[in-house]
Image (cartoon, grey):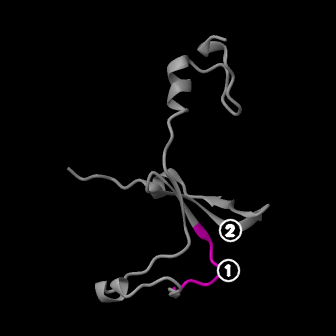
Amino acid sequence: MAASSQKTPGMPANLPPYTRNLLRIRVPVTVTLARKKQPVQSIVEIVPGAILQFNKSCDEMLELEISSQPAALGECVKVGDKFGLRITSMILPEERFKKVNA
């Protein structure tokens, strides 16, 4: 089967081939549970079984980042025996990108 006739689920067929190729680029997707700054001394004292405590409530939204840029907020869900993220709101592009002053 020729590459141009292959169909990829969720990809519009009427896009030019170069655009379809761009949509296939894999980018890192990260869900952040919580963040915290610690002194280096605390970090080197971490051992298996240690518990790191965060100031974030279990009810707060988790942040979805795409290529290290905030993209959405969501809540943790269980999908079979794995974790997932239910998107509850998107972060608008104007909120994600900051103006560069030259």
Say few, some or many: other residues with alpha carbon within 10 Å of mark 2 (under 14 / 14 to 19 / 20 or more).
some
- Residue 37 left/right relative to 22: left
Amino acid under disc 1: Asp
Range covered by the magenta-colored residues = 54-62
Q: State the predominant SS element of the stretch in magenta.
A: loop
Q: Residue at x 71, y 32 (%)?
A: 9
* Front-lying residue, 6 or 96: 6
Residue 95 versus residue 29: which sits nearer the camera?
A: 29
Q: Is residue 59 magenta?
A: yes
Residue type at the position of mark 2:
Glu
Per the image, label 2 sits on a secondary structure element best described as strand
Q: Position of residue 58 (x, y in %)?
A: 65, 81
Does dot 1 land on a helix, a strand or a loop? loop
Q: Mark 2 or mark 1, which is nearer the start of the sequence?
A: 1
Q: Nearer the viewer, residue 49 or 95?
A: 49
Decide: is 102 above or below 14: below
| Residue that label 2 marks | 75
Residue at 69% x, 68% y is 76
The residue that mark 1 highlights is 59
| Residue found 67% across the figure and 26% down from its top | 12
Where residue 29 appears, as percent x and y from the top left, is 53, 53
Real-space Cα separation, disc 1 to disc 2, in angstroms: 8 Å
